């Protein structure tokens, strides 16, 4: 499936109504650590395809969503399950650390 581009129009359908857990990366083009996390997010989307959805929210394009979820620093990674945020972390992290955090929701 790959990484979904999330915005105000599709967020509810793709994230809040999802039957599988969803990893949402709040990021921006100008953010160095966000760009570092890009390949990690892409790898996780491929590795966990069918078990989890992965999406990205560009905070410059979807400021309403960033505000709604209290995003103060980026990258911020939120895990949603059954429409609720079950985990939140900020800053770049190793792929293995992120995978370990996600596996408990599969």
Image (spheres, rainbow, N blue to C red):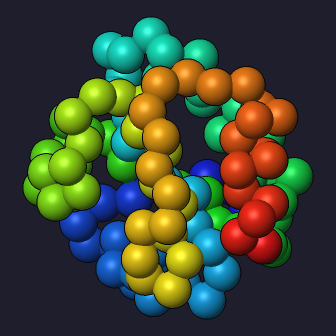
Q: Give the vertical position of 59 relative to 6 (above or below).
A: above
Total marks drawn? 0
Quarter of the image holding residue 81?
Answer: bottom right
Estimate the x, y position of residue 42 in percent, counting from the top left. Answer: 70, 40
Q: As rendered, which of 43 and 89 lies closer to the eye?
A: 89
Q: Residue at x 29, y 28 (%)?
A: 73
Estimate the x, y position of residue 84 in percent, counting from the top left. Answer: 41, 77
- In the image: residue 5, left or right of residue 21: left
Q: Quadrant of the N terminus?
A: bottom right
Estimate the x, y position of residue 45 in percent, counting from the top left. Answer: 73, 52
Q: Residue at x 49, y 67 (%)?
A: 86
| Residue 27 seen in the figure | yes
- In the image: residue 101, left or right of residue 31: right
Q: As rendered, which of 52 and 82 lies closer to the eye?
A: 82
| Residue 4 seen in the figure | no
Q: Residue at x 71, y 41 (%)?
A: 98
- Considering every residue shown, the one lying at the far top of the view is 32
Q: Quadrant of the C terminus?
A: bottom right
């Amino acid at each position: 499936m790959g990484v979904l581009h999330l915005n105000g129009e599709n967020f509810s359908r793709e994230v809040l109504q999802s039957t599988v857990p969803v990893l949402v990366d709040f990021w921006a083009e100008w953010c160095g650590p966000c760009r570092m996390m890009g390949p990690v997010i892409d790898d996780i989307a491929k590795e966990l395809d069918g078990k989890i959805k992965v999406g990205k929210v560009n905070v410059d394009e979807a400021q309403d969503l960033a505000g709604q979820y209290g995003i103060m620093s980026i990258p911020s990674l939120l895990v949603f399950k059954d429409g609720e945020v079950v985990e939140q972390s900020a800053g770049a992290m190793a792929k293995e650390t992120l995978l370990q955090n996600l596996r408990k929701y599969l």
